[in-house]
Image: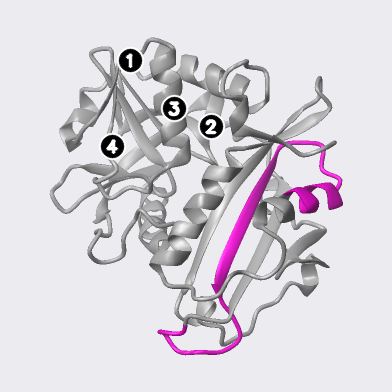
Amino acid sequence: MSVMFEKPGLVMMNGALVPFAEAKISVMAPGLTFAVAVFEGLRGYWNAAHGQMYVFRMAEHLRRLQFSMAVIELGDTAPGAPFDQQILELIRANSLREDVYVRVQTYIDDWGDMSATGPVGSSVICRRRPRTDAFAQGKHFAVSSWRRNAEDASPPRIKATANYLNSRLAGLEAKRNGYDGAVILNRDGSVSEGPGGCLFMVRDGVLCTPPITAGILESITRATLITLAREAGVEVCERDVGRTELHLADELFYCGTGQELVPILSVDRKPVGNGEIGAVVRLLQQHYDDLVRGNSSLHSEWLTPVFN
């Protein structure tokens, strides 16, 4: 079994540590039958020199989780200790000393109809997740025929499991057609995001990304990179990006908690720039890696150490 799909030993289920095989929800839970569920994905980064793991921007992720819960009207408080405590306890209990991925989920459990607001169940899983090869090698994308779901239909700014059906359809279409990933457009034909990640473009020396009103998740990775770019002296703009601009870009990349920063080498089999990974992407990758592993003096407030 690959590391990507390796099952963890212990998980948190409704605030209690249990073996993975015993972590169950009801077959009729609205979280399953009606996708009444929201989640967050976080990363923990191991620094061998420090003998420490750092969870990146945990507070921001958990604030977004609370926002998502409020929007879909989960009526009860999730069971157990606060999620920040559950995350740290779970990593320690699994004795992990390497890069990890953490997923926190809340959902309507037990039994109920589409409008049920409780009871709220929760789970926290943590598993090994090394950096993807695409971080160094890049990927090839295509513009999807599927359009992004709209703010007045299924708002993308919340991290709801239901929204990821849209991403799944776009991602599967791209892979069927021989690509690694997809660019999803809005109804007006401008760029939104990819399946599970936000998009950045370098054009004429300016780093551009679609605004949060473009049908994107309010990405914590995206916000981090905007800050890091500006601190590195890179001009940044948030504006609508047209589809054809993807073919005028000097560099493109895709970002999110899972994939971090993935260079995009081509779109619809047309090379981006000279078809190689660009200088701005490499600069941001280095600054990002230094930050999340605790090797930078900047933004230590974004790092939560796991081990005492």
Q: Secondary structure at mark 1?
A: loop
Magenta stretch bounds: 88-116
Q: Magenta span has 23? A: no
Confirm or deny contact between disc 3 and disc 2 (CB under 8 A): no
Mark 1 crowdedness (10 Å alpha carbons): few <14, some 14-19, many ≥20: few
Measure how far apart labels 1 and 4 are at the Cα level.
15 Å
Q: Amino acid at mark 4?
A: Asp
Q: Which residue is mark 3?
A: 225
Is tag 3's residue or tag 1's residue first in the polypeptide sequence?
A: 3
Q: Which mark is residue 134?
A: 2
Q: Residue at x 33, y 44 (%)?
A: 193
Foreground disc of the pair 4, 3: 3
Confirm or deny contact between disc 2 and disc 1 (CB under 8 A): no
Measure how far apart labels 4 and 3 are at the Cα level.
26 Å
Q: Which mark is residue 14?
A: none
Confirm or deny contact between disc 4 and disc 2 (CB under 8 A): no
Q: Which mark is residue 274?
A: 1
Q: Residue at x 25, y 22 (%)?
A: 249
The image quadrant that residue 156 belongs to is bottom left
Q: Secondary structure at mark 3?
A: helix
Q: Which residue is mark 4?
A: 268
Confirm or deny contact between disc 4 and disc 3 (CB under 8 A): no
Q: Residue at x 62, y 25 (%)?
A: 300
Is tag 4's residue or tag 3's residue first in the polypeptide sequence?
A: 3
Q: Is residue 203 above or below residue 215?
A: above
Mark 4 crowdedness (10 Å alpha carbons): few <14, some 14-19, many ≥20: some
Q: Amino acid at mark 2?
A: Ala
